[in-house]
């Protein structure tokens, strides 16, 4: 039985790791797309994003409205609450790049 030492195993592991990391990128090709195609894809993405955002907020507001109606009817002890978190980068000019979550 051959006894392997750390001196022979580590270089082999490093070579295998490097090859496993780099070789998958060698066999891929990228299809050239025209600027019009890219613009169309971006417009589709933006519309999809806006539709999903609209649906998300509509669902949130519908749920809050239902909870408010229950509160007004006396079936709920507390009014509904919507919590938002606003994150600012805190630059020299104030809320540069603020995120509204």
Image: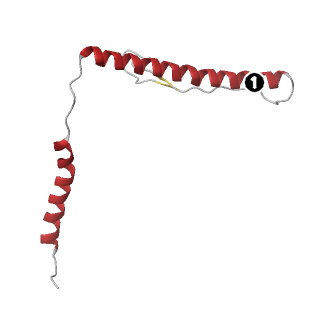
- Residue found farthest to the bottom: 1
* Residue 47: x %, y % from top left: 45, 17
In x, y percent, where is residue 68?
Answer: 76, 22
Residue at (75, 26) in percent of width and height:
67
Residue 6 in percent (x, y) is at 16, 72
Residue shown at the point (41%, 16%) measured from the top left = 94
Q: Position of residue 28 (x, y in %)?
A: 20, 39
Q: Is residue 91 visible?
A: yes
In depth, the one of 84 and 8 nearer the eye is 8
Determine which residue is flagged by label 1: 66
Q: Which residue extends farthest right?
A: 74
Element marked by disc 1: helix
Q: Is residue 29 above or below residue 74?
A: below
Give the residue displayed 39% in from the left and 16% down from the top: 43
User: Residue 62 is drawn in which quadrant?
Assistant: top right
Question: As rendered, which of 86 and 33 lies closer to the eye?
Answer: 33
Position of 67 compared to 45: left or right? right
> Observer-nearest residue: 31 or 19?
31
User: Residue at point 29% right, 18% down?
Assistant: 37
Query: Quarter of the image containing the N terminus?
Result: bottom left
Image quadrant where residue 66 sits: top right
């Amino acid at each position: 039985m051959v006894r392997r030492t750390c001196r022979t195993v580590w270089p082999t592991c490093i070579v295998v790791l490097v090859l496993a990391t780099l070789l998958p990128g060698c066999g891929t090709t990228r299809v050239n797309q025209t600027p019009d195609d890219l613009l169309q894809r971006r417009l589709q993405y933006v519309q999809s994003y806006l539709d999903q955002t609209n649906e998300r907020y509509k669902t949130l507001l519908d749920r809050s409205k239902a909870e408010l109606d229950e509160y007004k009817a006396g079936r709920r002890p507390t009014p509904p609450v919507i919590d938002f978190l606003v994150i600012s980068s805190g630059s020299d000019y104030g809320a540069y790049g603020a995120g509204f979550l």
